[in-house]
Amino acid sequence: MQTTAKLVPEIIELQPEFAALRRELHQHPELGFEEQRTSEQVARLLTLWGYDVCRGLGGTGVVGTLRKGTSPRSIGIRADMDALPIHEASGLPHASTVEGKMHACGHDGHTATLLCAAKYLAATRRFDGTLNLIFQPAEELLGGARAMLEDGLLERFPCDSLFALHTAPGLPLGNLLISEGPLTASSDRVTITLQGKGGHGAMPHKTCDPVVAAAALVLSLQTIVSRNVPASDVAVVTVGALQAGSAANVIPDEAQLRLSVRASNAVIRDLLEKRIRQLTEGIAAAHGVRAEIHYERLVPVLVNEVEATRRIAAVAADLIGHERILTRVPGGFLGSEDFAWMLEARPGCYVALGNGNQGVHGCSVHNPGFDFNDQAIAYGASLWARLVESVLAR
């Protein structure tokens, strides 16, 4: 393993132990809100190391708390635990043993990395205050963070600030992305049902054709970003599904569209909803059909608070050097992350940890050939350790 001299020596020594744990987690993936085995492993280890452990928060979430000294200061660090409904095709010796499920987004690595830091912090306790380690379920469902918050996470475990990381394939090992302000996009899901009047395909004049209305709507929706969103902003309106009819000579009564809508800031998010509703209602009226719109706001834009971002950036610079820290996402990114709910409740920062750019470590997440880079554990765990010791300095 290539290392940087300023990584925590004790964590470098722990890295093989937690690489083995990460691979064991990888072999036994569990989907969102089903992470029973994973959460039991997490809770058992935290208890062994002396943490006060709360299980079952937000369903299968775990919180480990470690207190030292008399300071009222507190910090929370979150790792997600869930896998994806993907059949693994990596061919690795530690590939998933569960059919149709795999850790294709690196959450096994996030969990192992935070546990590595947890063991070090419990052994050294070079801080003054309260440390809350948050192991969250169901990030892939964009519901786990909110479930933990609704279950009283921050009331029961107060945190002055919150932090999390995500693996970043394509970013060289030992590098970090740390960016102030908006980072990941909001994510909304829209279902539009167009109710018309069906009939024989040979007599369309006796019908109100919802398929033609749906086709017109699909094309019109694509003008929202190109004609309503300023070029300086980023947004996506994707029609991922269009379902209508089952026979060539029958005009159906109904057509349904399902949309994924993403925006890089709250103002554009509101604009997208307004225009989607206006276009849908106008095109439905023009074609003589009735429209029903079910608009679900899933997660907000994730915003890194300035002071917290600068704090973790300073810690990272001391570990790996300023030259290995990116401050902007190359090419833009409109993925979503439900840690955004936590950052709406408390100031904090979400960072990306380099996973490498070769082979299984460089291919995209949510890909059946992806794997977390075990060498990244020492970098991530050192970051968490030094961050705690900085924020809760004695």
Image: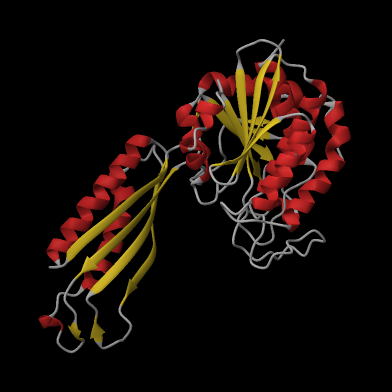
The structure residue drawn at horizontal position 75% and vertical position 58%, both measured from the top left corner, is 27
Q: Image point 51% across, 24% down: which residue?
A: 347
Image point 63% across, 59% down: which residue?
367
In the rendered view, does 51 fall on the left or right side of 6?
left
Please tell me which residue is depicted at 67% across the width and 38% down the height of the picture: 353
Which quadrant does the N terminus fall into? top right
Up-down: is 89 above or below 190? below
Residue 192, x across and y down, in percent? 28, 61
Q: Tell me which corner region of the image, top left, top right, bottom left or bottom right, holds residue 11.
A: top right
Q: Pinpoint residue 359: horizontal percent, then vertical percent.
A: 75, 55
Q: How many marks?
A: 0
Q: Is residue 116 above or below residue 283?
A: above
When the figure is inspected, residue 114 is found, relative to residue 307, above or below; the finding is below
Q: Judge whether residue 356 can be spotted in this image.
A: no
Residue 96 shown left or right of residue 299 in the figure:
right
Relative image position of residue 217 (x, y in whole percent): 26, 62
Image quadrant in which you'd find residue 90: bottom right
Where residue 298 appears, x then y in whole percent? Answer: 41, 46
In the picture, the quarter occupied by the C terminus is: top right
Q: Is residue 1 above or below residue 325?
A: below
Q: Is residue 177 visible?
A: yes
What colouring style does the render use? secondary structure
